Amino acid sequence: MLMALTVSVLLMTGSAEARGQQTDQIPGVSLGLVYAESYLPALAVKPFSSTFGGVGLASEVEAIVAQDLRYSDRFEVMDSLPAGLIGDQLDYTLWDRLGAVWLVTGQLESAGEDFVFAAELHDVVYGELRESGRFRIPAQSDEDFRMVVHRVSDEIVRWATGEQGMAASRIAFTMTDSEGNKDVHLIDSDGLNLTRLTDFGSLLESPSWSPDGRKVAYTSWRSGYPRIYEMNVATGSERMLAAVRGAGDYITPAYHPDGRTLAFSVLGSDARSGIFTYDFERDCCLAYLSGGPWYDFSPTYSPDGRWIAFNTQRFGDAVPQVMLMPSEGGSAETLSPYEYGSGGYFTAPDWSPNSDLVAFHGRIERGRYHVLVASLEDDGRVLRQLTTEGNNEDPSWAPDGRHLVFVGERSWGYGLFVVDVGTGRIRSLIAGRRVGVPDWSPALQAR
Amino acid sequence: MIVRRFLVPLVAAILVVGACGGDPPPPPAPPPGPDMDSLRAYQDSVRRAEEAARAEAARLAAERAAEAERQRAAAAARATLEEMVFFDYDISEVRDDAATVLRAKVDILRASPQVRIRIEGHADERGATEYNLALGNRRAEAIRQFLTGFGLSENRFEIVSFGEGRPLAQGSNEGSWARNRRGQFVITAGANAINPAE
């Protein structure tokens, strides 16, 4: 049993029909949203035009942008309307009558081999242009085409909300092949462009993005022992963490937000077990932060790099807990709701890239695992449960700090899902594959 | 036995004849007179040779049997060393049935000082992937501590966790899970110097 905590009233998440219903209370855990559910302004996308007859490309860009804005979960994106109905002229009255609050317009221009996309965001209520920008777009055959359009979508989100989007990002995760081996795969935030990053024919876990989005660190068993490596995503070049200090399992790498330091765990060592840091850039300066006869692992940095949340087994078997400590080491405190003898299973913490929210998953009822979010502001005393169906594990925050990707186990198999902690909406990212330990990239910049 | 006494020279004579090709046979040597001493000596030599042959055959058979037994015992000892142990759900403590298996390994390891072992810890698929890495490591560590608790040197063992990544059984049911949360043993040195327990 979990200790009794504040139990507040509860919004069922996951499906629109169920939203607003009350549900059975689970001690210590509130079902519901992390951000207050609020009204979503209606956003319309006027069919994008083209100055050179590239209608196909314009509609492709429009489809990507409209989908991205839908997936941002910050707007109710209106169904597209036929161009003939709208006309060429911008008529705020018409859009106001249709119920739009925001209107996105765009025009594609030819620019040598490439194109320029001129985007505008209009405030229909005030009847004025809010922002505009011009973006260079490569040809559709270019492998970067979709990512460049995703960046346009994130810019539109920023114009409307002032906040970071997540369209231009990718998720790294493991996928198991028919021989039971795992390799790192990447998929875009919209569920397209599935690519394989590694091909070692071995066991591999815990892919973790560098803060510049150029590298992925992970643990590979291909030497026979778990060791940490870092791969450059663009070039495929790889190196091993040089700081091997004797026997032990080297697992769960996580980058400091400054990109210079890597935190990781060494378990079963003949010397020390626990969380270490290492200057990956200079290949030196190993530091021991925490550990002991118990095990500490799965570190994750706060956005300012001053704190680390991590998982610990120091309370014994079967009661893993999430704790916090200063990132230079020091005394740790429990974030997950543990009291001696009370049990509780909380694992796989991931600290939001821009707030005091830490996501993890826990065993909640009848052996079910669900994605939970704790806020440091209330000392983790209220856990928000974001999933209700199946088993759900290993949440990882998007660069917008409001979406989480996680592994879901359903009656039909496994998949990656994305939940918006503002609306509770859940969508499938990849389904029916044996996937694991996703890590959402930072906002990806142009190459 | 008398027959043999005369037979031997006869055979010798035939052999001589054979060796001479087509020449007419020389007249047979006169049969030797009865010589009880040489007869006895001959009989003794035969008996000794037959006894030696029997002893040698028995020695060889015993050697073969001993070698077969030694191999069987070594194979049995190896199988004992490699026998997996299983754990309760989400627990790294060594179970009673596992302790029996491990205790048998201790005796063999004492008699086989060159043998080194890699202990592999595994978890079932339930729970967090990274947590299961730690759980597998704790299980391997619990086994190592059990073995070193009997005075075996720590440097004969290394441990590695595979978490939930290398299941024995693929199903998502208690039967498969029970098979998958286990410790496995790989002999990394001294595989041809395994002696059974004394």
Image (cartoon, helix red, strand yellow):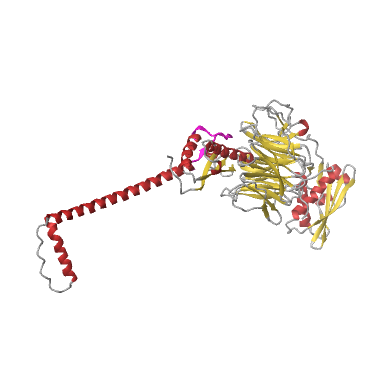
Q: Position of residue B101 (x, y in %)?
A: 48, 37
In the picture, measured across the screen, residue A35 lies left or right of residue A361, that is right
Quick one: A171 or B85, which is closer to the camera?
B85
Is any atom of residue A163 visible in this view? yes
Q: Is residue B94 magenta?
A: yes
User: In the rendering, at what x and y percent does residue A21 appear?
Assistant: 72, 30
Q: Position of residue A132 (x, y in %)?
A: 87, 50
Question: Which part of the image, by quadrant, shows the C terminus of chain B?
Answer: top left
Q: Is residue B164 visible?
A: no
Q: Among all residues in the image, which is located at the extreme front? A: B37
Q: How many marks?
A: 0
Relative horizontal placement of residue B68, taking residue A122 as reference (left or right): left
Q: Quadrant of residue A125?
A: top right
Location of residue A424 in the rendering, given as x and y in whole percent from the top left corner: 73, 37
Q: Which residues are magenta?
A: B82-97
For the point 45% across and 45% down, the residue is B194
Residue B197, quarter of the rendered image: top left
Q: Foreground residue, A442 or A153? A: A442
In the figure, B74 relative to A293: above or below? below
Q: Would you say the magenta stretch is mainly helix, strand or loop?
A: loop
> Eyeballing the image, is A200 above or below B174?
below
Q: Quadrant of the N terminus of chain B?
A: bottom left
In the image: residue A145, left or right of residue B187: right
Q: Residue at x 70, y 57 (%)?
A: A235
Taking depth in this image into account, of A186 and B135 the one nearest to the observer is B135
Q: Nearer the viewer, residue A163 or A310?
A: A310
Q: Is residue A310 magenta?
A: no
- Say if A295 sits above or below A112 in the image: above
